[in-house]
Structures are given as structure tokens and as C-alpha cells.
Image (cartoon, rainbow, N blue to C red):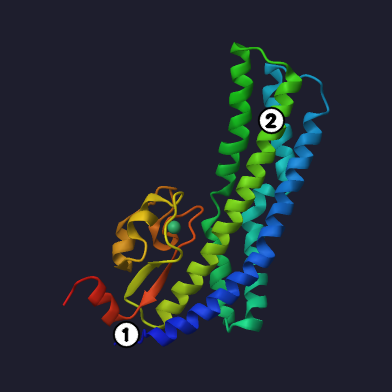
């Protein structure tokens, strides 16, 4: 006997909107500040020498890694767990969230971002290594190299801070929707959120506004960004969220009896 109805979903939406607004206000500036700090430290480390030889590649890599570690970049998942708790508390002023729900959100968000370290290594450390290796084939002025690395870090840091914050906020929204939907006994979920745009993920393009069971979403496995479709839908950079659908609407939209 599902209790999901349009009124309950509308009330949940108002609640989610308040939580997301609070999250956006708090999370993105905090993350950008942390990553910006790392970038400044790396740029300073790079400028300590005029030249970096290929033999010194590992030294340079460890300098960069050390600067990232000092700025707490590798601890972002931990940091985010703390931020998520703060958001949950703040959101309690504008929307009722139980302490249990809050803890659930914080733990779920933290658990999903444990892959962050590998992303930093792949996108920053590996890029530097590749750039250093390529210069043994094609010699480069080292100051130019330092400028390139600094520029790459600057672009990467800004890009990732944005993606990370956006994805983290979407994940808070999804976790809250799932908690709400489960409390309502939802059997059906809509691939909900803004209509697809040119840069949307392929699965968001295909499934946006469609209604699925949780089992169907789970059976889709990983999305194109390497995260599980349930509960992240399109994964990194995706702004969509599963929202509960009442059974009558679900059956009608799915063309079932
Ligand atoms: Zn999406």
C-alpha cells in the first residue's frame, strides 16, 4: 500500500530546494578555497628552481603531491563529511531533517567520494609525469614547462572544484530524496531534474523524465562517469536526481496495466 502522493512529493521538493540552496551557499566556496590554496602552494614550489631536469621528475612530482596534501586536497572526502553535517544542521532551521537522516546523508556522501584521491593523481600528478617524459623526446625550456604546469593546475583546480561541489550538492539532494521516497514507500522513481542540454551525459539524454523501479536503475550498473546509476544517475557533473512517483502516474507513464 504505497503512500506516495503528489502532495507529499511537492512538500519534499520544497524541503529539498531549501537544503540545496543552503548547500550551494556553503559548500562551493569552501571547496574552491581549499583547492585554490593547494594551487598557490604548488606554484610557489615550482618557482623555487629555474630548471627541472627529467632526472628530477620524481622530486617535482613529490613536491606537487606534498603541496596538495598540505592543503588538505586528499582529505576532501573527510572535509566534505564535515561540511555535509554542517549543512544538515543548518537545513534543520528551514526544513525538518531528523538527526538520523543527517548522519545518513553525511556518511553516504563521504563514502561516495573516496575515489577523489585517484582522480587527483590521474588528472594532476600523471599529467605532470607525462609532460616531463615528453620533454626527453622534445626538449623544452624549463621555465615554459613550469608555466605550463602552473596553468594546468590553475585550470584543473577551478574545473574540479566546480564539478566536485556541484556533484556533492547533487548527491546531498539525491540522498535526501531517497530517504524521503523510502519513508513514503516509493516503488517508482523519476529520472528528475532539468531537461537535458548539449553537454548532458548520454544516459541523462536518454532517460530524463522516465520512470523506473529501483531494481531497474540498479541493473543499469555503472554510468559513463564510472559511478553506479543507483543512486548517482549520470554521476560526476550530473544534476539529476531520482524522485518518488505515485503508483498511478508510474503505471500510466510506463504503459502498464
Ligand atoms: Zn544528469
In the picture, measured across the screen, residue 12 lies left or right of residue 162, that is left
Q: Name the residue under label 1.
A: 2
The residue at the point 32 percent across, 85 percent down is 2
- The image quadrant of residue 87 is bottom right
Q: Position of residue 55 (x, y in %)?
A: 69, 17
The residue that appears at 73% across and 38% down in the rendered structure is 66
Ligand 1, by image quadrant, is bottom left
Q: Quadrant of residue 147?
A: top right
Which of 111/9 is in front? Answer: 9
Q: Do callouts 1 and 2 mark residues in contact (Cβ within 8 Å)?
A: no
Q: Residue furthest left?
A: 257
* Residue 175 horizontal/vertical position (percent): 49, 69
Task: Give the distance between the C-alpha atoms of the residues marked 1 and 2, in whole angstroms.
Answer: 56 Å
Residue 108 coordinates in the image, percent (x, y): 52, 65
* Secondary structure beneath label 1: loop
| 1 or 2: tag closer to the N-terminus | 1
Which residue is drawn at the image coordinates 19% and 72% (left, top)?
255
Residue closer to the observer: 81 or 241: 241
Count neighbours of disc 1 (C-alpha within 10 A) and say few if under 14, some if 14 to 19, many if 20 or more: few
Say whether residue 42 is left or right of residue 247.
right
The local secondary structure at tag 2 comes to helix
Above-or-below relation of 161 to 21: above
- Judging depth in this view, the residue of 209 and 20 nearest the camera is 209
Q: Which mark is residue 149?
A: 2
Quadrant of the image containing the C terminus: bottom left
Q: Looking at the image, is 71 positioned above or below residue 177?
A: above
| Residue 131 visible in image | yes
Amino acid at each position: 500500500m504505497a503512500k506516495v502522493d503528489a502532495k507529499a512529493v511537492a512538500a519534499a521538493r520544497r524541503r529539498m530546494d531549501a537544503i540545496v540552496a543552503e548547500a550551494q551557499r556553503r559548500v562551493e566556496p569552501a571547496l574552491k578555497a581549499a583547492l585554490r590554496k593547494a594551487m598557490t602552494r604548488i606554484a610557489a614550489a615550482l618557482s623555487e628552481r629555474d630548471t627541472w631536469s627529467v632526472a628530477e621528475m620524481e622530486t617535482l612530482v613529490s613536491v606537487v603531491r606534498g603541496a596538495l596534501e598540505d592543503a588538505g586536497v586528499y582529505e576532501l572526502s573527510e572535509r566534505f563529511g564535515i561540511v555535509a553535517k554542517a549543512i544538515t544542521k543548518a537545513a534543520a532551521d528551514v526544513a525538518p531533517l531528523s538527526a538520523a537522516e543527517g548522519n545518513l546523508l553525511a556518511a553516504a556522501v563521504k563514502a561516495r567520494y573516496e575515489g577523489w584521491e585517484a582522480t587527483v593523481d590521474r588528472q594532476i600528478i600523471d599529467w605532470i609525469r607525462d609532460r616531463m617524459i615528453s620533454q626527453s623526446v622534445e626538449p623544452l625550456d624549463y621555465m615554459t614547462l613550469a608555466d605550463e604546469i602552473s596553468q594546468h593546475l590553475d585550470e584543473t583546480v577551478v574545473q574540479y572544484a566546480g564539478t566536485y561541489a556541484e556533484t556533492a550538492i547533487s548527491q546531498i539532494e539525491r540522498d535526501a530524496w531517497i530517504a524521503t521516497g523510502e519513508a513514503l514507500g516509493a516503488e517508482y522513481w523519476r529520472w528528475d531534474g532539468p531537461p537535458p542540454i548539449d553537454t548532458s551525459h548520454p544516459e541523462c539524454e536518454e532517460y530524463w523524465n522516465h520512470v523506473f523501479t529501483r531494481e531497474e536503475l540498479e541493473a543499469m550498473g555503472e554510468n559513463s562517469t564510472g559511478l553506479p546509476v543507483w543512486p548517482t544517475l549520470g554521476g560526476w557533473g550530473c544534476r539529476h536526481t531520482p524522485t518518488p512517483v505515485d503508483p498511478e502516474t508510474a503505471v500510466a507513464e510506463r504503459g502498464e496495466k
